[in-house]
Every structure is written in C-alpha cells, then in structure tokens.
Image (tube, rainbow, N blue to C red):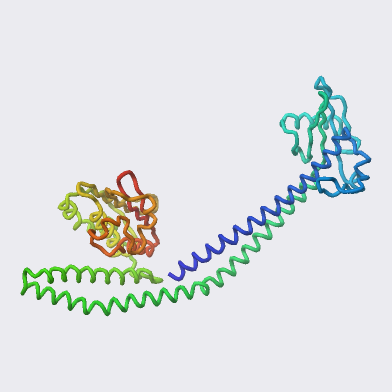
Amino acid sequence: MLRRMSRRFVGAAMAAITAVVLVLLCFLNLWNYRSVVDQLDRTLDVIAAADGRWPDFALRQPEPPRDGAAPFSGELPYMIRFFAVHYGEDGGISGVDHDFIASVSADEAAAYAAAALELGRGRGFYGGYGYLVSGDGGETSVVFLNAERELSAVRSLLITTAAVAALCLAAVFILVLLFARRAVKPYMRNLEMQKQFITNAGHELKTPLTAISTSADVLAMELEDNEWVRNIQPQSARLSKLVADLVTLSRLDEENPLPEKARFSLSDALWEAADPFAPLIRAAGRSYSQSIEDGLTLTGDRAAVQQMASILLDNALKYTPEGGKISLRAFRSGRRNIIEVSNTCEGLEDADLERLFDRFYRADKSRSGAVKGSGIGLSIAKAAAEAQGGRIRAEKKGDRIVFQITL
C-alpha cells in the first residue's frame, strides 16, 4: 500500500511539474522564434520597398518605428546577406540583384525564386533564407534574406532549453523519489490506524455477534413462530458478514496481502467457484451460461481469485432482473488471463461505472434496501485483483454490464 501510494504521489507530482516546465519551454522558444521572424520580416519589408537594395533612410531613423520595434543598427547592412529576383509583366525575369551576397549566382537566385513562387505563400522560409513576394503594377519581386544564423540560434536555444529542462526534471524526479515516502507517511499512518481499528473492532465484535446468533437459534427452536426471533437471525447474519467483509478489505489494503501465492489451475478454480451459483441463478428465474477455457494457469492466490468470481456472480444474481441473462467467461489473451462476468442490467448510467468499486456505493438507489449486501463486495474484488498485480473494470454494452478482470 505504501509503495502504491508513493508511486501515485511521484506520478502526480512529476505530471504537474512536467506540465509547468513544458509550458515554460514552449513559451520561451515560441517567443524567441516569433521575435526572430518579426525582425527578419521587418528587414525584408525594407529591402522589398527599396526594390531589392538596402536603402539609406533605413540607417538614419531618428526615432523608433511606430510599431514599437527598435530602429535598425548602422552595422546591419554589413551583417546581412540578401538578393532579389524581379519579374516583368510577361512573367519573365527582368533582373536579379545579388550584389549583397557572394555565394549565390544569378542562376541560383532565379532557381530560388521559382521554388519560392511554387510554394504559393507571400512569406516564408526556403533553403535557409527568409523570403518575401511583393508585386506592383503586374511586376513581381521575390526578396531573399539569409537567415541561417538566426535559425541556428533558434535551434540552439531550443536544444539548450530542452536539455536544461530534462536535467531539471531528472533532478526533481530524484528529489521527489527521496521525499515521496516522507510526504505520504502521515496519510499512511492514518490508514494504518484505520485498518488496525477495523481489525480490532472486527475481532471484538465477533464474540458478541456469535453469542447473539447462537441465542437467536436457540430461541428459534423454542419459539418457532416468533417474529422478533425471525428478525434477529438474518440481521445478526448480515452484521457478521459485514464485519468479515471489512476485515477482508482491511487485509487486502496491506503491503503484502497475499503472501501465499503459488501456481494453480485457474480453470479448475473458476469451475469450483461457479458451480454453486448455476442452480441458484436458474432457480431465481435467470438464465446462466459459462465458457471457461481449459488449461488456464496463474501464479497467485487461488482463494482470492475464487472470492472475486463469487463476488461478481453474486452481484450479478442480485441485480439481474427476472428473465435476465448472466454469463461467465474465462480465456487467455496473449500473456494475460481474462475473466468476464456479464449480466442484464437496468437503469445504470455510464457515469455510475466509475463509482461502482467505491466502498458502500449503490448505483441503484431504489433497490438498495431490497438488495441484501454490504455494498463493499466490488471493492473487495478490486482490491483482490490489484493485490495480484491485475485490474478490474466495468463497462456497459447495450442492456448488459460486463465486469472484466485482467490477471
């Protein structure tokens, strides 16, 4: 139990911290990328307005531009490389300006422009260059600005921040692991006190309950038709069953609730557990079918598996309307053993499925008084399945509810 609680604490803590780190990582890199792109777009706009040349006025801005961006530096023309390809009204190339770049020839510039135009976008990136397509009076110009240094800086920041985030998460994970047990220890201490109280109370209640039940049986033999005695007997039996269930549930919450695990025939165990229910189900006016695959084996606790099957069949018998159907299936799927108990069900909403395994929860409030039971049977089945490393779930299929145990 402590190990499971620690894992859940670590998982919840790491999920929250990872979400925060990822949000910060995404925000920082998106903000940096957006800033770089905005600066490149401003530069492209100025070059395009000057027909592919660097204008002198851009270097003599007396004040920041109206959009709030910083003015261009006087060193900027010596730090950038760009070229432009101009198209005439007939669609042919009317000129190529590549005086501000040495590594691109006129033919290469024309090839870049043709590829950019094929993309069909006014702005974008192509081959390490940011480009802008502009037109006036039927003429079109495609301006390219070398952005390799800026894009490399964006990638470097992304890699650096991702590495730092990964190292931070690893360090936090180690710290959370170290402090997880200490953090859940008060909660676990309360649980241990609760379990100890239930166990002690159960043992203390067994003696008076046994005395009450025995006395009621004696009175029943002497006073055969006494209605008070008839009321005491079923109620004392119900209370004894509730105490036994609470003690069982408390035991299954322990760190190692099933120490006597061994390899056994799952098929035989299920046949044995289901055998008493077949005549009871048919006598109650319900139909019953079962299909248990031969040769199923499991390393676990045979009694706990039989208890799970009995709880699910008993639950199906209680809540299946007259004329309904109940079925038991057991088969192997890959490396897992699957046990399914399904029954006809009325009035169960999908939202109730998540709460069916809560202790003392009754999905059908209108029948909670008519149906005998403590309301913790499914909780015991869930605890027993998890104690063996398995899981149990419920789903509704048409007019039937299916409980599936995976071991």
Please tell me whether residue 346 is drawn above or below residue 133 in the rendered image.
below
Q: Is residue 127 visible?
A: yes
Residue 287 in percent (x, y) is at: 20, 47
Classify residue 274 by image quadrant: bottom left
Identified at 22% across, 79% down, the residue is 207
Residue 236 is left or right of residue 180, and the answer is left
Image coordinates of residue 162 in percent, x first then y, are 67, 56
261 on left or right of 231: right
Location of the N terminus by quadrant is bottom left
Q: In the rendered view, does 301 fall on the left or right side of 152?
A: left
Residue 324, position as x, y percentages in the image: 23, 47
Residue 66 lies in what quarter of the image?
top right
How many numbered badges does the structure rendering display? 0
Q: Residue furthest top?
A: 90
Q: Quadrant of the C terminus?
A: bottom left
Front residue of 309/32: it is 32
Is residue 407 something that shows in the picture? no
* 282 shown above or below 127: below
| In this view, 150 is above or below 6 | above
Q: Nearer the viewer, residue 121 or 136?
A: 136
Q: Position of residue 13 (x, y in %)?
A: 55, 64
- Front-most of residues 253 and 52: 52
Name the residue at 91% across, 45% down.
61
135 left or right, relative to 329: right
